[in-house]
C-alpha cells in the first residue's frame, strides 16, 4: 500500500497518511522511525480536519516516499524553549526568585541556555531566540534578582 504524509490530526495529534483510495491512517510511531499505521482516521465533513482515534493496526506492507520524520534535536529545541519560558516567568510572576529557574541560578541558567543555543549549526539555530536575547535575559534577570520585592514588581 502506498501512502503520502498529509499532516497531523486525531485526538492524539498524530502524523497522518492517506492512501491512493483516500483512506486516512494515523502513525503511532509519531515520526520516530518506521511507520506504524492504524485505521480510525477520517476528515471532518465541515472543516476537513483529520479526526478520530487509532483503531486497528495496518498489517500490509506500507510504502511512503517522504514520511514525516522528527528532527533529531527536537528535545534540544524544546529544552531551549522551556529555559526561555523560565526566564519570562522569573522576570514576571516569579518575582526574581531563582528557585523558579531550571538551573537554580541566573548565571548557570543563562550559561546553559547559551551553550545549548551555540550547539546548533548556523542553519539550525532557532528563529525565535537569538544570542542577543539570551544576553538581555541575563542582564534583566541579574537586576531582577537584586530587586526581588523592589519597585519594579
Image (cartoon, grey):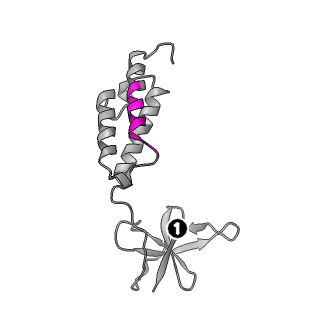
Q: Which residue is at 65% across, 69% downward? A: 48
Q: Quadrant of the N terminus?
A: bottom left
Q: Position of residue 144 (x, y in %)?
A: 42, 21
Q: Position of residue 55 (x, y in %)?
A: 49, 73
**Residue 135 appears in the picture as rendered:** yes
- Secondary structure predominantly adopted by residues drawn in magenta: helix
Q: Position of residue 84 (x, y in %)?
A: 42, 38
In the drawing, does residue 48 fall left or right of residue 132?
A: right
Picture quadrant where residue 101 is located: top left
Q: Which residue is at 44% across, 38% downward? A: 85
Q: Secondary structure at mark 1?
A: strand
Category of crowding for the residue at label 1, using alpha-carbon neighbours closer than 10 angstroms: few (below 14), some (14–19), many (at least 20): some
The stretch of residues the image draws in magenta is 128-139
Vertical position of residue 130 compared to residue 141: above or below: below
Picture quadrant where residue 49 is located: bottom right
Vertical position of residue 134 compared to residue 18: above or below: above
According to the picture, the residue beneath numbered tag 1 turns out to be 7
Amino acid at each position: 500500500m502506498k501512502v503520502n504524509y498529509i499532516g497531523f490530526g486525531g485526538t492524539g495529534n498524530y502524523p497522518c497518511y492517506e492512501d491512493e483510495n483516500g483512506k486516512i491512517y494515523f502513525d503511532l510511531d509519531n515520526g520516530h522511525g518506521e511507520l506504524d499505521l492504524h485505521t480510525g482516521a477520517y476528515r471532518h465533513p465541515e472543516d476537513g480536519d483529520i479526526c478520530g482515534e487509532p483503531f486497528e493496526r495496518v498489517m500490509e506492507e506500507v510504502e511512503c516516499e517522504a514520511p514525516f520524520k522528527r528532527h533529531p534535536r527536537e528535545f534540544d529545541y524544546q529544552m531551549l524553549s522551556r529555559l526561555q519560558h523560565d526566564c519570562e516567568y522569573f522576570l514576571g510572576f516569579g518575582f526574581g526568585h531563582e528557585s523558579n529557574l531550571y538551573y537554580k541560578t541566573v548565571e548557570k541558567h543563562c550559561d546553559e541556555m547559551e551553550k545549548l543555543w551555540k550547539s546548533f549549526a548556523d542553519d539550525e539555530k532557532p528563529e525565535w531566540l537569538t544570542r542577543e536575547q539570551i544576553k538581555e535575559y541575563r542582564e534583566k534577570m541579574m537586576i531582577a534578582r537584586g530587586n526581588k520585592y523592589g519597585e519594579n514588581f
